[in-house]
Image (spheres, helix red, strand yellow):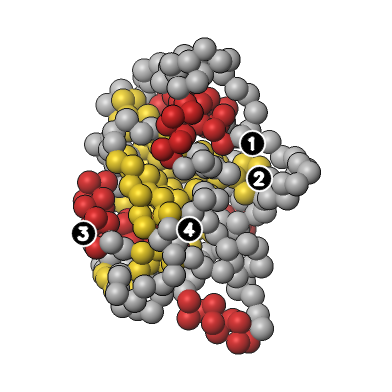
Amino acid sequence: MCTRVIWPDAAGAVLVGRNMDFHKDLMTNLWKQPRGVQRDDGVRGKLTWTSKYGSVIAAAFDIISVDGINEAGLAGHVLWLAESTYGTYDESRPALSQASWLQYFLDNFATVAEAVEWIGQTDVQVIQMDDPTGGNPPTIHLALDDATGDSAIIEYIDGKAKVYHSRDYHVMTNSPTYDRQIELLTRWEGLGGDQPLPGDTDAEHRFARAAYYASRLPAPSSPVDAIAGMLSVIRNAAQPFRIPDPGKPDASQTIWQTVTDLTNRRFVYESTTRPNIVWVDLADLDFAEGTPQLKLDLCGKLSLEGGIAGNVGDQFEDDGPMTFLSLTMLEQLAAAGQAAPAG
Protein backbone atom coordinates (compact mmCIF):
# COMPACT_ATOMS: atom_id res chain seq x y z
CA MET A 1 0.00 0.00 0.00
CA CYS A 2 1.76 3.12 -1.35
CA THR A 3 4.75 3.87 -3.55
CA ARG A 4 7.33 6.66 -3.33
CA VAL A 5 9.82 7.62 -6.09
CA ILE A 6 12.60 10.24 -6.24
CA TRP A 7 13.79 11.85 -9.49
CA PRO A 8 17.02 13.52 -8.37
CA ASP A 9 18.15 14.95 -11.70
CA ALA A 10 15.06 16.45 -13.32
CA ALA A 11 16.99 19.10 -15.27
CA GLY A 12 18.32 20.75 -12.13
CA ALA A 13 15.40 19.93 -9.84
CA VAL A 14 14.67 17.13 -7.37
CA LEU A 15 11.14 15.71 -7.58
CA VAL A 16 9.36 13.11 -5.48
CA GLY A 17 6.16 11.30 -6.39
CA ARG A 18 4.02 9.13 -4.15
CA ASN A 19 0.83 7.11 -4.32
CA MET A 20 -1.37 6.85 -1.24
CA ASP A 21 -2.98 3.43 -1.39
CA PHE A 22 -5.65 2.65 1.19
CA HIS A 23 -8.87 0.67 1.45
CA LYS A 24 -10.98 3.64 2.58
CA ASP A 25 -11.16 7.40 2.17
CA LEU A 26 -8.67 9.13 4.50
CA MET A 27 -10.61 12.41 4.26
CA THR A 28 -7.40 14.13 3.25
CA ASN A 29 -7.05 17.90 3.40
CA LEU A 30 -4.00 20.10 2.90
CA TRP A 31 -2.68 22.32 5.71
CA LYS A 32 -0.30 25.24 5.96
CA GLN A 33 1.72 24.93 9.15
CA PRO A 34 3.62 28.14 10.05
CA ARG A 35 6.78 28.67 12.04
CA GLY A 36 6.49 29.17 15.76
CA VAL A 37 3.82 26.53 16.50
CA GLN A 38 4.31 24.85 19.87
CA ARG A 39 3.79 21.08 19.80
CA ASP A 40 4.38 18.00 21.91
CA ASP A 41 5.08 14.36 21.16
CA GLY A 42 1.49 13.15 21.47
CA VAL A 43 2.65 10.56 24.00
CA ARG A 44 3.09 12.08 27.44
CA GLY A 45 4.44 15.50 26.52
CA LYS A 46 8.05 14.87 27.51
CA LEU A 47 9.28 15.98 24.10
CA THR A 48 8.14 19.47 23.16
CA TRP A 49 9.24 21.83 20.43
CA THR A 50 8.46 25.01 18.53
CA SER A 51 8.35 24.65 14.75
CA LYS A 52 11.44 26.14 13.12
CA TYR A 53 10.20 25.72 9.55
CA GLY A 54 6.80 26.20 7.98
CA SER A 55 5.35 23.38 5.92
CA VAL A 56 2.53 22.25 3.65
CA ILE A 57 1.18 18.84 4.59
CA ALA A 58 -1.42 16.33 3.50
CA ALA A 59 -3.27 15.00 6.55
CA ALA A 60 -5.37 11.90 7.19
CA PHE A 61 -8.61 12.70 9.04
CA ASP A 62 -6.98 16.01 10.07
CA ILE A 63 -5.16 14.18 12.90
CA ILE A 64 -1.91 12.90 11.34
CA SER A 65 0.60 14.21 8.80
CA VAL A 66 1.13 11.64 6.06
CA ASP A 67 2.94 13.66 3.39
CA GLY A 68 4.43 17.12 3.02
CA ILE A 69 7.31 19.52 2.44
CA ASN A 70 8.83 22.31 4.51
CA GLU A 71 10.29 25.67 3.52
CA ALA A 72 13.84 24.29 3.46
CA GLY A 73 13.00 21.63 0.88
CA LEU A 74 12.80 18.65 3.24
CA ALA A 75 9.87 16.35 2.46
CA GLY A 76 8.44 13.27 4.10
CA HIS A 77 6.07 10.45 3.22
CA VAL A 78 4.32 7.90 5.46
CA LEU A 79 3.79 4.43 3.96
CA TRP A 80 2.52 1.11 5.32
CA LEU A 81 4.93 -1.62 6.50
CA ALA A 82 3.27 -4.67 8.02
CA GLU A 83 6.54 -5.83 9.59
CA SER A 84 6.82 -2.72 11.79
CA THR A 85 7.14 -3.46 15.52
CA TYR A 86 7.57 -0.47 17.79
CA GLY A 87 8.21 -2.15 21.15
CA THR A 88 6.82 -1.28 24.56
CA TYR A 89 6.90 2.38 25.53
CA ASP A 90 10.22 3.11 27.25
CA GLU A 91 9.96 6.25 29.37
CA SER A 92 13.76 6.63 29.38
CA ARG A 93 13.76 7.37 25.63
CA PRO A 94 12.28 10.36 23.80
CA ALA A 95 9.19 9.27 21.91
CA LEU A 96 6.89 10.46 19.16
CA SER A 97 3.39 9.28 18.40
CA GLN A 98 2.84 8.01 14.88
CA ALA A 99 0.61 11.04 14.31
CA SER A 100 3.41 13.52 15.08
CA TRP A 101 6.32 11.52 13.67
CA LEU A 102 6.54 13.14 10.23
CA GLN A 103 5.60 16.59 11.52
CA TYR A 104 8.53 16.60 13.95
CA PHE A 105 11.00 16.29 11.07
CA LEU A 106 9.27 18.89 8.91
CA ASP A 107 9.18 21.31 11.85
CA ASN A 108 12.81 20.92 12.86
CA PHE A 109 15.16 19.93 10.02
CA ALA A 110 16.34 21.28 6.69
CA THR A 111 18.07 18.15 5.39
CA VAL A 112 17.85 14.38 5.57
CA ALA A 113 21.35 14.26 7.09
CA GLU A 114 20.26 16.44 10.02
CA ALA A 115 17.23 14.24 10.66
CA VAL A 116 19.24 11.01 10.50
CA GLU A 117 21.85 12.40 12.88
CA TRP A 118 19.11 13.32 15.39
CA ILE A 119 17.63 9.82 15.25
CA GLY A 120 21.06 8.33 16.00
CA GLN A 121 21.78 10.74 18.83
CA THR A 122 18.43 10.39 20.61
CA ASP A 123 17.41 6.74 19.96
CA VAL A 124 13.91 8.15 19.53
CA GLN A 125 11.04 5.70 19.83
CA VAL A 126 7.83 5.78 17.79
CA ILE A 127 4.65 4.86 19.64
CA GLN A 128 1.95 2.96 17.77
CA MET A 129 -1.52 4.51 18.04
CA ASP A 130 -4.89 2.81 17.96
CA ASP A 131 -6.89 3.66 14.86
CA PRO A 132 -9.59 6.01 16.21
CA THR A 133 -11.86 5.21 13.26
CA GLY A 134 -12.05 1.53 14.19
CA GLY A 135 -9.45 -0.01 11.88
CA ASN A 136 -6.30 -1.91 12.72
CA PRO A 137 -3.52 0.03 14.49
CA PRO A 138 -1.20 1.52 11.85
CA THR A 139 2.11 -0.13 11.05
CA ILE A 140 4.05 2.49 9.11
CA HIS A 141 7.49 3.45 7.94
CA LEU A 142 8.75 6.86 6.86
CA ALA A 143 10.69 8.21 3.88
CA LEU A 144 12.55 11.52 4.02
CA ASP A 145 14.10 13.35 1.06
CA ASP A 146 15.52 16.80 0.47
CA ALA A 147 16.42 19.33 -2.18
CA THR A 148 20.00 18.01 -2.41
CA GLY A 149 18.67 14.61 -3.56
CA ASP A 150 19.43 12.85 -0.28
CA SER A 151 17.12 10.08 0.91
CA ALA A 152 16.42 7.99 4.00
CA ILE A 153 13.92 5.25 4.83
CA ILE A 154 13.19 4.77 8.54
CA GLU A 155 11.68 1.51 9.76
CA TYR A 156 11.02 0.30 13.31
CA ILE A 157 11.74 -3.36 14.04
CA ASP A 158 11.72 -4.65 17.63
CA GLY A 159 11.33 -1.10 18.90
CA LYS A 160 14.51 0.24 17.28
CA ALA A 161 14.96 2.50 14.28
CA LYS A 162 16.60 0.95 11.25
CA VAL A 163 17.69 3.79 8.97
CA TYR A 164 18.59 3.22 5.31
CA HIS A 165 20.37 6.42 4.29
CA SER A 166 21.70 6.86 0.77
CA ARG A 167 21.23 9.09 -2.26
CA ASP A 168 20.80 5.87 -4.22
CA TYR A 169 17.57 4.90 -2.44
CA HIS A 170 15.11 6.42 -4.90
CA VAL A 171 12.18 3.99 -4.57
CA MET A 172 10.14 2.72 -1.63
CA THR A 173 6.98 0.65 -1.38
CA ASN A 174 5.85 -1.69 1.41
CA SER A 175 6.66 -5.24 2.51
CA PRO A 176 9.18 -6.76 2.87
CA THR A 177 11.61 -4.60 4.86
CA TYR A 178 13.84 -2.29 2.83
CA ASP A 179 16.97 -4.46 2.97
CA ARG A 180 15.04 -7.33 1.38
CA GLN A 181 13.47 -5.00 -1.20
CA ILE A 182 16.93 -3.97 -2.39
CA GLU A 183 17.98 -7.62 -2.72
CA LEU A 184 14.83 -8.60 -4.61
CA LEU A 185 15.15 -5.69 -7.04
CA THR A 186 18.11 -7.24 -8.85
CA ARG A 187 16.01 -10.13 -10.20
CA TRP A 188 14.37 -8.09 -12.93
CA GLU A 189 15.45 -7.42 -16.49
CA GLY A 190 16.88 -3.95 -16.86
CA LEU A 191 17.70 -3.85 -13.12
CA GLY A 192 20.42 -6.50 -13.04
CA GLY A 193 18.47 -9.71 -13.59
CA ASP A 194 16.83 -11.68 -16.37
CA GLN A 195 13.20 -12.01 -15.27
CA PRO A 196 10.56 -9.97 -17.16
CA LEU A 197 9.46 -6.79 -15.44
CA PRO A 198 6.39 -7.73 -13.31
CA GLY A 199 3.02 -6.13 -13.85
CA ASP A 200 0.90 -6.92 -10.79
CA THR A 201 0.27 -4.84 -7.65
CA ASP A 202 2.50 -6.67 -5.13
CA ALA A 203 4.74 -4.22 -3.30
CA GLU A 204 8.02 -5.72 -4.53
CA HIS A 205 6.71 -5.63 -8.10
CA ARG A 206 5.59 -2.00 -7.85
CA PHE A 207 9.08 -1.32 -6.47
CA ALA A 208 10.62 -2.85 -9.59
CA ARG A 209 8.40 -0.97 -12.05
CA ALA A 210 8.92 2.36 -10.29
CA ALA A 211 12.69 1.86 -10.24
CA TYR A 212 12.78 0.82 -13.89
CA TYR A 213 10.69 3.66 -15.28
CA ALA A 214 12.12 6.37 -13.01
CA SER A 215 15.61 5.52 -14.27
CA ARG A 216 14.48 6.05 -17.85
CA LEU A 217 12.73 9.40 -17.64
CA PRO A 218 13.80 11.86 -20.36
CA ALA A 219 15.19 15.23 -19.34
CA PRO A 220 12.27 17.63 -18.81
CA SER A 221 12.05 20.94 -20.63
CA SER A 222 10.32 22.78 -17.75
CA PRO A 223 9.11 22.30 -14.15
CA VAL A 224 5.65 21.41 -15.49
CA ASP A 225 7.19 18.85 -17.85
CA ALA A 226 9.06 17.35 -14.89
CA ILE A 227 5.85 17.00 -12.89
CA ALA A 228 4.20 15.27 -15.86
CA GLY A 229 7.12 12.85 -16.07
CA MET A 230 6.90 11.95 -12.40
CA LEU A 231 3.13 11.51 -12.61
CA SER A 232 3.66 9.05 -15.48
CA VAL A 233 5.87 6.89 -13.25
CA ILE A 234 3.71 6.83 -10.14
CA ARG A 235 0.57 6.24 -12.19
CA ASN A 236 2.28 3.13 -13.55
CA ALA A 237 2.73 1.93 -9.96
CA ALA A 238 -0.83 2.86 -8.92
CA GLN A 239 -3.39 0.28 -7.85
CA PRO A 240 -6.83 0.23 -9.53
CA PHE A 241 -10.15 0.20 -7.72
CA ARG A 242 -11.13 -3.39 -7.01
CA ILE A 243 -13.02 -5.76 -4.77
CA PRO A 244 -10.50 -7.10 -2.21
CA ASP A 245 -8.90 -10.41 -3.09
CA PRO A 246 -9.85 -13.46 -0.97
CA GLY A 247 -7.96 -13.39 2.31
CA LYS A 248 -6.80 -9.81 1.73
CA PRO A 249 -9.54 -7.60 3.18
CA ASP A 250 -7.23 -4.58 3.33
CA ALA A 251 -6.08 -4.81 -0.29
CA SER A 252 -5.71 -1.19 -1.25
CA GLN A 253 -6.45 1.03 -4.19
CA THR A 254 -4.69 4.30 -4.95
CA ILE A 255 -6.84 7.08 -3.51
CA TRP A 256 -4.53 10.04 -4.17
CA GLN A 257 -1.13 10.99 -5.53
CA THR A 258 1.33 13.79 -4.88
CA VAL A 259 4.33 15.17 -6.73
CA THR A 260 6.63 17.41 -4.72
CA ASP A 261 9.21 19.64 -6.40
CA LEU A 262 11.78 19.97 -3.62
CA THR A 263 13.85 22.49 -5.55
CA ASN A 264 11.07 24.89 -6.55
CA ARG A 265 8.99 24.18 -3.42
CA ARG A 266 5.80 23.16 -5.24
CA PHE A 267 3.34 20.59 -3.84
CA VAL A 268 0.99 18.92 -6.34
CA TYR A 269 -2.01 16.81 -5.28
CA GLU A 270 -4.33 14.64 -7.36
CA SER A 271 -7.28 12.67 -6.01
CA THR A 272 -8.34 9.53 -7.87
CA THR A 273 -11.92 9.86 -6.62
CA ARG A 274 -12.25 13.62 -7.17
CA PRO A 275 -9.94 13.80 -10.20
CA ASN A 276 -8.74 17.37 -10.43
CA ILE A 277 -5.08 18.32 -10.00
CA VAL A 278 -4.32 21.13 -7.56
CA TRP A 279 -1.01 22.59 -6.47
CA VAL A 280 0.45 25.14 -4.13
CA ASP A 281 3.73 27.04 -4.37
CA LEU A 282 5.19 27.55 -0.91
CA ALA A 283 6.36 31.02 -2.01
CA ASP A 284 2.70 32.06 -2.17
CA LEU A 285 2.06 31.28 1.51
CA ASP A 286 3.01 33.27 4.60
CA PHE A 287 4.74 30.98 7.09
CA ALA A 288 5.71 33.74 9.54
CA GLU A 289 5.43 33.05 13.24
CA GLY A 290 2.06 34.20 14.51
CA THR A 291 0.21 33.55 11.26
CA PRO A 292 -2.61 31.00 11.55
CA GLN A 293 -2.60 27.40 10.54
CA LEU A 294 -4.64 27.28 7.34
CA LYS A 295 -6.61 24.44 5.78
CA LEU A 296 -7.49 23.67 2.19
CA ASP A 297 -10.74 21.72 2.49
CA LEU A 298 -10.24 19.20 -0.29
CA CYS A 299 -13.04 17.00 1.03
CA GLY A 300 -15.50 19.82 0.45
CA LYS A 301 -14.09 21.82 -2.46
CA LEU A 302 -13.05 18.93 -4.69
CA SER A 303 -16.50 17.39 -4.22
CA LEU A 304 -18.34 20.46 -5.50
CA GLU A 305 -19.66 20.38 -9.05
CA GLY A 306 -16.67 21.32 -11.16
CA GLY A 307 -14.45 21.14 -8.07
CA ILE A 308 -11.27 23.16 -7.93
CA ALA A 309 -8.13 22.87 -10.02
CA GLY A 310 -4.81 24.56 -10.60
CA ASN A 311 -2.94 26.85 -8.22
CA VAL A 312 -4.88 26.89 -4.94
CA GLY A 313 -2.48 28.89 -2.78
CA ASP A 314 -5.10 31.57 -2.23
CA GLN A 315 -7.83 29.11 -1.17
CA PHE A 316 -6.43 27.99 2.19
CA GLU A 317 -8.69 29.18 5.03
CA ASP A 318 -8.50 29.56 8.80
CA ASP A 319 -10.50 26.68 10.28
CA GLY A 320 -8.66 26.61 13.60
CA PRO A 321 -5.47 24.68 14.30
CA MET A 322 -5.02 21.05 13.38
CA THR A 323 -5.21 18.72 16.39
CA PHE A 324 -2.78 15.81 16.13
CA LEU A 325 -3.95 12.48 17.50
CA SER A 326 -2.44 11.78 20.93
CA LEU A 327 -2.61 9.10 23.60
CA THR A 328 -4.52 11.55 25.77
CA MET A 329 -7.12 12.06 23.04
CA LEU A 330 -7.49 8.30 22.57
CA GLU A 331 -7.93 7.80 26.31
CA GLN A 332 -10.57 10.50 26.47
CA LEU A 333 -12.43 9.03 23.51
CA ALA A 334 -12.26 5.54 25.01
CA ALA A 335 -13.60 6.80 28.33
CA ALA A 336 -16.49 8.47 26.52
CA GLY A 337 -17.13 5.44 24.32
CA GLN A 338 -16.57 7.49 21.17
CA ALA A 339 -14.51 7.34 17.99
CA ALA A 340 -12.55 10.23 16.57
CA PRO A 341 -14.39 12.23 13.93
CA ALA A 342 -13.55 11.15 10.38
CA GLY A 343 -12.58 14.54 8.98
Label 2 belongs to which residue?
A: 252
Q: Nearer the viewer, residue 326 or 228?
A: 326
Q: Provide the residue designation for mark 4.
A: 85
Residue sitting at x 35%, y 69%: 95
Q: Nearer the viewer, residue 89 or 137?
A: 89
Residue wearing tag 1: 239
Q: Nearer the viewer, mark 3 or mark 2?
A: 3
> Considering only order in the chain, which callout, 2 or 3, is on the residue closer to the N terminus?
3
For the image shown, how many numbered marks are present on the structure?
4
Q: Which mark is residue 121?
A: 3
Q: Earlier in the sequence, mark 1 or mark 4?
A: 4
Secondary structure category for the residue under label 2: loop
Circle 3/circle 2 CB separation < 8 Å:
no
How many C-alpha atoms fall within 10 Å of the one at disc 3: few (<14), some, or many (≥20)? few
Q: Amino acid at mark 2?
A: Ser
Tell me if residue 294 can be seen.
no
Query: Is residue 79 among what the camera can see?
Result: yes
183 or 339, which lies in front?
Answer: 183
